[in-house]
Image: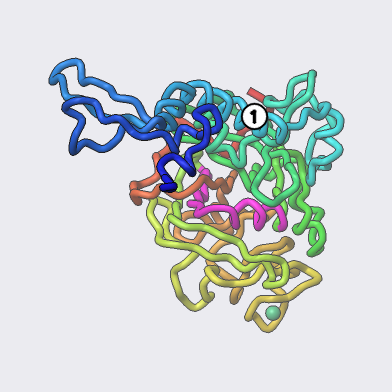
Amino acid sequence: MATTYEGAFLEPRSRRSRAQEPRIESPGAAGREPRSRASRTQRHPEFGIETRVPECATMVLRWLPVLCSLAAMNLLASETKKLTLISRQELYDRLANKHLLEGNRLEQLQNVPRGGVSPELLAKDCRSAFLNGRRASGLYAIQPKDSPPMAVYCDLRPDGGGWTLLQRNTRGNGVFSGPSAWSSYRSGFGNLTGDHWLGNELIYLLTRQNSFAVRFLLVDASGNEHRADYHSFRVDSEANGYALRLGDYSGDAGDAMTVTNETGTHDNMKFSTADRDNDRFPKNCAEEHGGGWWFDNCGSNFLNSHSDIYWRGLCGRDNPCIASSIMIQPGRKNCSTLPAPLPGDHYPIHTGSE
Ligand SMILES: [Ca+2]
């Protein structure tokens, strides 16, 4: 009996998988790749060209708007999580220099509403406040990078671009006649709405976060205003004696900070006080002149005087300047000159909130 093997290994149709089924080619399908089940054909509406779009791509395209929305919401939620709302009192407690606020009056801070504030949203300096639309000069709480918040006087007149004041001296109220110790100049003294020294530590924290320009403004005995701009300004840390680092000069007051003469040059000098002599004079310049400064031998200027504000070539003992102020703002990347004060403007003589 002949044994036939035909169909001996065939299983019943119901038990065969589809892959095992004989493939039946449709007419005209010869030579073409079998159509993948994980793709679909899409006809271009204009050129009629058929392209095959993978199903996974179709799914991604279909759900892309939803995925984008979810990602945006997630990003927004993560950003929102970083913000903290603290009360005005709590911010005040955190201020590094609250002793410079007259009468501890919280309402003096123009950007801290009664309902509280998010420290993360505070400007890092007065220039930032200006760019955020602030135009009223006065006291602001700022939050420099890697620093506790601090209160500063912001000069925000439209033509100025946003200045952060470091010093104001109108020789009033004896503010500059008392403090002489290193610790006083380190932590600052006076009243931010009047005469004050912001403090070497805060000046260091401010100027280490960016490239700053500085303006020394002086009012001579006749009431005329003069300025000395330096296109870069930085103060080193206390470990390096709060040494002064200045760039190129421009202005009409005369370069009394970086010029080298028989009294030395102030640039690159460490700060000196009555109890810390870092100058190159045989005696102690700070003790001799009655206040702290970047003295050399002893120098060509001294703005922290309670009596004679000195700037070589502009005002001296016989014709002392009657007011001074020191202010900074981030340096301009394009090296353009700093805006000049308008005729009649008197930067240093702000004695109250505007
Ligand atoms: Ca000395």
**Rendering colour mode:** rainbow
In the image shown, does 39 or 106 lie closer to the viewer? 39
Helix, strand or loop for disc 1: strand
Residue 64, image x and y in percent?
46, 25
For this view, does 200 lie left or right of residue 66? right
Labels in figure, total: 1
Q: Quadrant of residue 135?
A: top right
For this view, does 271 lie left or right of residue 225? right
In the image shown, does 340 or 199 lie closer to the viewer? 199
Q: Where the C terminus falls, by quadrant? A: top right
| Residue that protrudes farthest toward the bottom in the picture | 282
| Above or below: residue 302 compared with residue 343 | below
Residue 208 sits inside the magenta stretch: yes
Residue 59 sits inside the magenta stretch: no
Which quadrant of the frame does ligand 1 lie within?
Answer: bottom right
> Which residue has dot 1 on it?
138
For this view, does 70 lie left or right of residue 176? left
Using a 10 Å C-alpha cutoff, classify the residue at mark 1 as few (fewer than 14 neighbours), some (14 to 19) or many (20 or more). many
Task: Inspect this view and state whether residue 162 appears.
Answer: yes
Q: Which residues are magenta?
A: 201-221
Residue 57, image x and y in percent?
40, 31
In the image shown, does 132 or 180 lie closer to the viewer? 132
Task: Inspect this view and state whether residue 306 appears.
Answer: no
- Look at the numbered disc 1 and say if its residue's Cβ is closer than 8 Å to ligand 1: no
For this view, does 14 lie left or right of residue 77? left
Residue ID at (67%, 33%)? 78
Residue 42, image x and y in percent?
27, 22
Instruction: Tell me which amino acid carries mark 1.
Output: Gly
Q: Quadrant of residue 302?
A: bottom right
